Image (cartoon, rainbow, N blue to C red):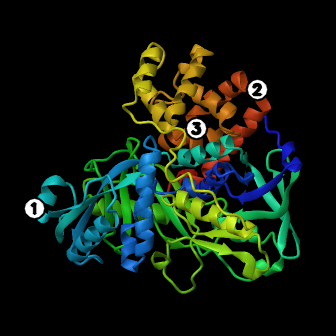
């Protein structure tokens, strides 16, 4: 049950607004260092930009073109940290770059970039790059476009297939370390006295109940609202509205089933028509294609890939892999988000800097407010470290050592861990081996807690969907132990069911049944959730041409 009455009885050192990956990283770091921390998120944790990325933990090879060498080095270092601290969620990924004559990046330029990439990742645990001459490339990638082919390159980055779970583990570790974490809690107003925020007013988006977060003389407010940073600043006095901070770009992805010619490794390719880079990535038995990069000035909610973006990604994939023959019918899911990049007037979307900025609002009249502008999935841990260090400086206190550089996430476990095999043997008569391994990937070592629910009722060992390894116990675990509040929370962020099988629509009867019989829901709440679920998918994930009464021809 949601009960936040204690919010008004406590005084916080750090108030974090925004529960995406960066806000989660800040909260985890702060709580582990002993700060009395609260994080409020107006939707579900990881429901914004963190949920709409390409799911890569990467150094940003193309950032080298814009001479953002420090950003690349930071990202490569953090990639290595994440491979160590969350090996169940972050795994090495081989990427292949085909090189064509006449495109924007010639062979020599790619080779130079690869060498520099290796140099900047001198402390990596993945193999170095290798260049592939034309004949070798054609032998390995027989279905790729051969027109003007010069060869290719291969290198390693990493993939966070379940990016939302990475955010959630940070949130829950922050909670275990003493932080108060609130999803569906929106900031509504700030009280300001002189040059300080003295209170943050918020409202529970599910009950409508208002709350006031109290501060003391040293409290620092952290704005990690991503694309909504400027909206949060509009809750403060007019001084903070004087300059626009976010100039985001829209990035859209499509998910398709495996297709003829789909390679085993991820592809980092340049679009044949306009030279823009995008990824074709194997992902959970599907293929993830994206992203677009369009300057965005519209409404942030709701947001989805438009028909032109879907057609662009399909067309460019077919041009690079002619055997694919992808059409609109092959698209099984789409998603779109806005990158919270710094506002830089006059620059093309691809030229906007990807480095993050910690904006101190002292110059705008409020001394205890810091906003994060930018920020990537890859660098969230370092953002948290920097932000907490900055908060301590504002408090006039010496910061304790940062623990997150070496401390694993709570689910940290390797696939060879004896605990996994022990659970295979313990639950093998009720749960498939594939499902046990899936649970220890999705939840890490805490997969044991999900399996323990099967002892409560054998029914909870049953599959949610016949084509997926997820079991009914995960629904119960999500609602009871992981602060899930809606059916969308379960299928989009506690699991990836919605992205893999018909938008999760087929699982709604199962969700409603389990929620009522094990989680105390009534029929009216289930009906509301089912209606809201259909609305959410239509507004954010189902392509417009699939929503139209008469399908539009490609």
Q: Where's residue 514, x and y in %? A: 66, 25
Horizontal side of residue 208 vs 418, given as left or right? right
* Mark 3 secondary-structure assignment: helix
- In this figure, what is the number of numbered marks? 3
Disc 2 residue crowd, few under 14, some 14–19, many 20+, Cα 10 Å: few
Q: Where's residue 227, x and y in %? A: 63, 66
Q: Which residue is drawn at 54% across and 52% down?
A: 404
Horizontal side of residue 282 vs 139, given as left or right? right
The span from disc 3 to disc 1 (Cα, nearest Å) is 46 Å
The N terminus - image quarter:
top right
Q: Nearer the viewer, residue 402 or 77?
A: 402
Is residue 554 something that shows in the picture? Answer: no
Q: Where's residue 41, x and y in %? A: 71, 53
Say which of marks 3 and 1 sits in front. Answer: 1
> Which numbered disc, 3 or 1, marks the residue that appears first in the sequence?
1
Which residue bears the numbered disc 3? 505
Identify the image quadrant of residue 363: bottom right
Horizontal side of residue 365 vs 308, given as left or right? right
Identify the image quadrant of residue 511: top right
The span from disc 2 to disc 3 (Cα, nearest Å) is 22 Å
* Mark 2 secondary-structure assignment: loop
Which residue bears the numbered disc 1? 135
The span from disc 2 to disc 1 (Cα, nearest Å) is 63 Å
Which residue bears the numbered disc 2? 520
Disc 1 residue crowd, few under 14, some 14–19, many 20+, Cα 10 Å: few
């Amino acid at each position: 049950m949601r009960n936040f009455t204690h919010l008004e009885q406590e005084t916080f050192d750090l108030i974090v607004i925004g529960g995406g990956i960066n806000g989660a990283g800040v909260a985890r770091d702060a709580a582990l260092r002993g700060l009395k921390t609260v994080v409020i998120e107006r939707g579900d944790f990881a429901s914004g930009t963190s949920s709409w990325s390409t799911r890569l933990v990467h150094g940003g090879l193309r950032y080298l073109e814009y001479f953002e060498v420090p950003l690349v080095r930071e990202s490569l270092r953090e990639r290595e940290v994440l491979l160590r601290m969350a090996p169940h969620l972050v795994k090495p990924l081989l990427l292949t770059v085909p090189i064509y004559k006449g495109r924007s990046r010639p062979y020599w330029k790619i080779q130079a970039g690869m060498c520099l990439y290796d140099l900047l990742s001198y402390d990596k645990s993945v193999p170095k790059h290798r260049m592939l001459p034309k004949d070798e490339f054609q032998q390995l990638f027989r279905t790729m476009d051969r027109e003007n082919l010069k060869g290719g390159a291969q290198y390693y980055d990493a993939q966070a297939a379940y990016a939302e779970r990475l955010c959630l583990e940070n949130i829950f570790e922050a909670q275990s370390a003493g932080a108060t974490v609130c999803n569906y809690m929106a900031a509504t107003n700030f009280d300001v006295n002189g040059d300080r925020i003295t209170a943050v007013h918020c409202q529970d988006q599910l009950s409508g109940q208002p709350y006031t977060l109290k501060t003391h003389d040293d409290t620092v407010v952290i704005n990690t609202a991503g694309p909504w940073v400027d909206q949060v600043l509009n809750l403060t006095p007019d001084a903070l509205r004087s300059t626009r901070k976010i100039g985001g770009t829209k990035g859209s992805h499509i998910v398709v089933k495996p297709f003829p010619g789909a390679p085993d490794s991820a592809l980092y390719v340049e679009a044949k028509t306009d030279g823009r880079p995008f990824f074709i990535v194997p992902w959970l038995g599907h293929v993830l294609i994206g992203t677009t990069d369009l300057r965005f000035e519209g409404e942030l909610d709701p947001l989805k890939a438009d028909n032109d973006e879907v057609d662009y990604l399909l067309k460019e994939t077919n041009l690079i892999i002619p055997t694919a023959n992808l059409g609109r019918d092959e698209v099984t899911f789409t998603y779109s988000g806005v990158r919270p990049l710094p506002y830089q007037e006059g620059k093309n979307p691809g030229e906007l800097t990807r480095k993050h900025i910690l904006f101190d609002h002292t110059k705008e009249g409020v001394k205890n407010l810091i906003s994060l502008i930018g920020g990537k999935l890859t660098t969230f841990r370092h953002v948290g470290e920097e932000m907490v260090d900055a908060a301590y400086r504002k408090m006039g206190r010496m910061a304790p050592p940062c623990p997150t550089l070496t401390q694993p996430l709570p689910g940290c476990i390797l696939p060879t861990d004896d605990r996994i095999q022990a659970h295979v043997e313990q639950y093998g008569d009720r749960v498939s081996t594939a499902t046990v391994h899936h649970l220890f990937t999705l939840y890490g070592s805490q997969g044991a807690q999900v399996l323990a629910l099967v002892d409560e009722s054998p029914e909870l060992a049953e599959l949610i969907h016949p084509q997926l390894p997820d079991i009914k116990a995960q629904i119960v675990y999500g609602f009871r132990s992981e602060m899930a509040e809606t059916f969308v929370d379960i299928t989009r962020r506690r699991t990836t069911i919605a992205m893999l099988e018909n938008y999760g629509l087929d699982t709604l009867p199962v969700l409603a049944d389990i929620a009522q019989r094990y989680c105390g829901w009534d029929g009216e709440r289930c009906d509301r959730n089912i209606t809201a679920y259909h609305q959410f998918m239509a507004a954010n994930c189902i392509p417009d041409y699939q929503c139209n009464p008469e399908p539009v021809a490609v």
